[in-house]
Image (spheres, rainbow, N blue to C red):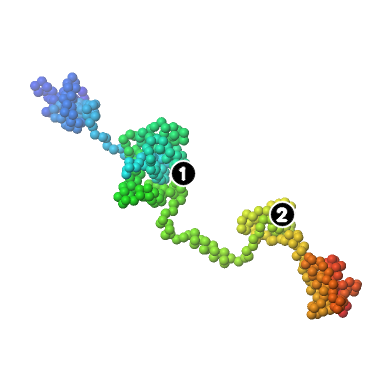
Amino acid sequence: MKPYWNRRTELYEELGCVMWGHRLVVPEQCKGKILKIIHEPHMGIVKSKALARSYVWWAGLDEAVERTCRECAACAAQADSPPRQTPRMWPWPARPWSRLHLDFLGPIAGKTYLVVVDATSKWLEIFNMSGISASYLIDRLNELFSRFGIPRQIVTDNGAQFTSKEFEYFNKFNGIEHVFTAPYHPASNGLAENAVKTLKRVIKKAIQEKQNINRALWSFLLYYRNVEHSTTGESPAMLLLGRRVRTRLDAIKPDREGHVRRAQQRQQEAATGANRNLDRSDEVWYRQYLKGEKWIPGQIVEVLGSSSYKIKGTGGEVVHRHIDQLRKRPSEGRLSLASATPRLSNRVDEANSQGSDPGGAGSEEDKSEVSAGAGTPRAVEPPASQPQPAPASPGGEHLLSPTNIGRGRPIRQCRLNRPK
């Protein structure tokens, strides 16, 4: 009764009715009938309130009129849509290819396409579908997953292909969570819808310019994937592949690889040193840095690179050395032949210098010794008219006798004892 008490000085009676100004104060038993009359034209909440305020009043009149209008089934069936909700963003996955948004494009120009968008990198894929059944959809997704892997989650609308049992088993088999958007609300799958809108414009432009649709789509995707996205600030190729894909525009950039190769060539030409090559099983001396000898004999057991080798020492140890730490060592057979030949050559020279024929015309015995040193021992008899070489040691032996050669004694020692 408090609202009536607050207006007690404004209430008055007229012809047996309680009035508040020009408005009738309706008793409790008549409120329902009055509300029904007020709402009878179905004018809505605002106009119904204005009508009620022109004739009647009671405590809580506005609330009662509003509740009556909201409970009316006819008004609710024909009501306008509520104000659009503030957009709610999908959570951005931290890893690429975690959530994919799928949708169909077309039919356009007699073809239907499947559009796939990665939520993280905004990478676009489009497939020309020869059919729109679930089996064709699964084939295209298997082809896509073979390139980039299986995602954790996919988002689609409520199309017949996506709600089929076959597609449900496919997702369960691959461990994919399938999220459906609200029916008849394309904005819930806005990422795929925007991709469909973009690619549809590309197809229409290709048709208008009488170009090949597939080539136009491939060209668009090549450059689209290489351009920074407005949301992520990175190109889809960089986020998904970790690199920029090469396009025709990269041909106008300076050739950095050629510049590096030329610089390396100049450095190599300016560097000093000798070019040496070693092969596997070569005998070498390798540098020793621990206690002991400075150079140790070994054999190459593995070629690691153009300048890097593995060496096996005489003790069986295997070490890693650079070619600057190696010296080539001749094998034992070659070493003995190389060491014997210079000594024999020196003895022949000494003998020739001491021979009886200064002009070199005749010491056939020396020639026979040279022939023996070359590996073909044969005796050459001196001509009868040729005098025998006289130089001999004090002991009576010839300087180039086989006895002296076998001893390995240098000829120079015999020359010191030669009588003056």
Indicate whether 390 appears above or below 83. below
Tell me the number on the disc at residue 400.
none
**Horizontal relation, residue 19 to residue 117: left or right:** left
Residue 88 percent location from the top left of the image = 35, 39
Q: Quadrant of residue 135?
A: top left
Residue on which the image places disc 2:
313
Quadrant in which the N terminus appears: top left
Q: Quick one: label 1, few (<14), some, or many (20+) residues within 10 Å?
A: few
Q: What amino acid is labelled 1 in the image?
A: Arg
**Horizontal relation, residue 266 to residue 401: left or right:** left
Which of 51 and 113 lies nearest the eye of the viewer? 113
Which of 152 and 126 lies nearest the eye of the viewer? 126
Pair 1/2: label in front: 1
Tell me the number on the disc at residue 147.
1
Give how far apart the Cα atoms at labels 1 and 2 are. Answer: 50 Å
Q: Residue at x 46, y 39 (%)?
A: 150
Q: Quadrant of residue 388?
A: bottom right
Q: Earlier in the sequence, mark 1 or mark 2?
A: 1
Which of 50 and 347 lies nearest the eye of the viewer? 347
Q: Residue at x 37, y 48 (%)?
A: 214
Badge 2 marks a residue whose secondary structure is strand
Which of 186 and 354 lies nearest the eye of the viewer? 354
Residue 260 seen in render: yes
Quadrant in which the C terminus appears: bottom right
Badge 1 marks a residue whose secondary structure is helix
Indicate whether 131 appears above or below 271. above
Q: What amino acid is labelled 2 in the image?
A: Gly
